[in-house]
Amino acid sequence: MNFLHPDKLWSREEVLARPSPVPKEPGVYAWFFRNLPSIVPTEDCVAREHLRLLYVGIAPKEPPQNGARSSRQRLFHRVRYHYRGNAAGSTLRLTLGCLLSESLGIQLRCVGSGRRFTFGQGEELLSVWMHANAFVTWQTHPEPWVLEEQLIGKLSLPLNLDMNSEHPFHATLSNIRRQAKAAARAWPVQ
C-alpha cells in the first residue's frame, strides 16, 4: 500500500485547485500531520519526513445492508470537504477542532436544529491550520471499506475512532469529543 511510502502528499492548496488532482472515484485517503498537540501519541505512527500518518478515511461508506441507498461520495468530494467544510460533515475536522480548540481559540457549538455541531467562525481558523499542517494522499479502490479495515487493524492511527477501540488514545479522544459536545449543548443554538 502506498500509504506507508506515498509518492506525494497533497496540500490544501493543491487539492482545492481547479482542476483538482483528487479522483472522482471510490477509495481510501490518508492524512499526514505536523504540529499536533503533544497529547496525541505519534511515536508508533508511520512517518514521512517531519509528518505523521494519523487518520484514514474512505469514500463512499460501505453500502447499507438494509437495502437503503448507497452513498454517492467519492474521493474528490470527501477529501475536498475535509479541507474546506465544517465539523458537522467531517469527523476529521471535528476531532482536529476539539484537539486544537484551546490553541486556536475556537469552540464547538450547536447549530441549526441543535443536533449538528460546528466551530462556527472558527472553521476558517481550522482551515488555515490545516493549510499549514495537514497533507493527504489517496488510493482508488472499488471497495474502500475493505482496505480501511485492514489499515486500521495494521497501523497506529490515533485520530480514527471507528473500528479502532483498541488504540491507546481511543478513550482519551472519545472523552475530549464528548466533553466538547456537552459544552456546546450548554450554549444557545446558533
Image (cartoon, grey):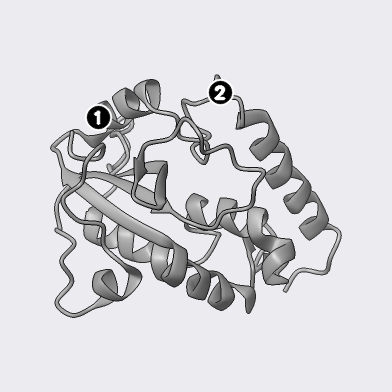
**Looking at numbered disc 2 in the image, what kind of residue is underneath it?**
Ser
50 relative to 110, above or below: above
Q: Quadrant of residue 156?
A: top left
Q: Quadrant of residue 52?
A: top left
Q: In the figure, is residue 89 to the left or right of 139? A: right
Q: Which residue corresponds to the image point at 80% horizontal and 50% vertical from the top-left? A: 182
Tell me where residue 36 appears, x and y as whole percent: 57, 54
Which quarter of the image is occupied by the N terminus?
top left
- In the rendered image, the residue lying farthest to the right is 186
Q: Which residue corresponds to the image point at 26% horizontal and 36% vertical from the top-left? A: 4
Q: Are marks 1 and 2 in contact (CB under 8 Å)?
A: no
Q: Disc 2 on helix, strand or loop?
A: loop
- Kindly identify which numbered label has been placed on residue 165: 2
**What is the CA distance from the residue labelled 1 to the residue labelled 2?**
18 Å
Q: Disc 1 on helix, strand or loop?
A: helix
Q: Is residue 108 visible?
A: no
Viewer-closest of 82 and 53: 53
**Looking at numbered disc 1 in the image, what kind of residue is underneath it?**
Leu
Tell me where residue 168 appears, x and y as whole percent: 60, 25
- In the rendered image, the residue lying farthest to the front is 49
Q: Which residue corresponds to the image point at 37% horizontal and 36% vertical from the top-left? A: 46
Q: Which residue corresponds to the image point at 20% horizontal and 46% vertical from the top-left? A: 6
Q: In the figure, is residue 27 to the left or right of 39? A: left
Q: In the figure, is residue 34 to the left or right of 175? A: left
Viewer-closest of 57 and 187: 57
Q: Quadrant of residue 175?
A: top right
Question: What residue sits right under mark 1 in the picture?
Answer: 147
